[in-house]
Amino acid sequence: MFIEIDFNSDEALYLQLRNQIILGIATSQFQEGDSLPSVRQLADTIGINMHTVNKAYTVLKQEGFVKVDRRKGAIIAIDIDRIRTMEELRKDLQVILAKSSCKNITRDEIHALIDEIYEDYGGLK
Amino acid sequence: MFIEIDFNSDEALYLQLRNQIILGIATSQFQEGDSLPSVRQLADTIGINMHTVNKAYTVLKQEGFVKVDRRKGAIIAIDIDRIRTMEELRKDLQVILAKSSCKNITRDEIHALIDEIYEDYGGLK
DNA sequence: TAAACTGTTATAAGATGGCTATAACAGACA
DNA sequence: TGTCTGTTATAGCCATCTTATAACAGTTTA
């Protein structure tokens, strides 16, 4: 499992961790039913506090990416809430597209970039 | 000028303000050379502190959306730093696409949603 | 010239969030 | 029993967000 944390980034540690795990799930590095490392173990590996990892797991649970089992720890379990996902997606994209449009990035370039990302991460479903 | 601030949102006020102004630029509500309201005036209109508006303007300046003139206040002036913009765009999209992919949103649906947003905001260049 | 407006800067204070540290608890398992 | 889970509580430190008050220098207008 490859987790890379940038301690110089202004993005919160627990959010970096969350994003990397989501990327891991999307690229099938983690699959439905797989366990994530225990909070203590992962914290030790990365070199951060246990509670920071715990916070990332809690967020992933709230967002429907994992379920937590007292026996097996955090387990990948996707909860597909399609409506909520689409609403969030729409809001996120609005800001991004507005920013891009201001900077003269065209609609076609956006489409192309998306295809590029899908090809880079061949694992994306 | 329509600025809507959600005081219950967990997004910082100055970021909400920044996003709405960027959306305004993208939809040609503001055009190159137009002035934004003065920090004091806009703060008064919205009902927030002057410094919060000032912070939004400062961020917009750093990100290359406005320039500040002591005489005319904040003026829309897009600085097109194509490389930097594309790098940021790529990072933002990676996270969004990974999240969507986990939730079974397909590549085609992403493309369709983008076109939808472009049509909703007819003004997008 | 004087008044009213710009952005800018400084300082302070309160609230919230991020991160760490230490500690303890209940349940699962060998 | 000892060791591993997640969970909870408390505390402290630091950075960020927001507000408040105040002042300064330059610009515009009456």
Image (cartoon, coloured by chain):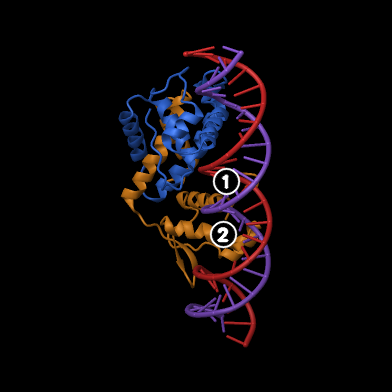
Chain colours: A orange, B blue, C purple, D red
Q: Is residue B57 visible?
A: yes
Q: Label 1 marks which chain's residue?
A: A
Tag of residue A23: none
Left or right: where A125 falls relative to B79: left
Relative image position of residue B55 (x, y in whole percent):
55, 35
Q: Residues within 10 Å of mark 1 (few under 14, many from 20)?
A: few
Three-letter amino acid code at the position of disc 2 = Val
Q: Label 2 marks which chain's residue?
A: A
Q: Is residue A105 visible?
A: no
Image quarter (top left, top right, bottom left or bottom right) of the C terminus of chain B: top left
Relative image position of residue C5 (x, y in whole percent):
50, 23
Residue at 34 percent across and 37 percent down: it is B113
Report which residue position mark 2 lands on: A53
Left or right: where B114 falls relative to B61: left
Label 2 SS? helix
Q: Marks 2 and 1, how far apart in space?
A: 15 Å
Nearest the eye: B123 or B7: B7
Label count reads 2
Q: Residues within 10 Å of mark 2 (few under 14, many from 20)?
A: many
Q: Is residue D11 above or below residue A123?
A: below
Report which residue position mark 1 lands on: A11
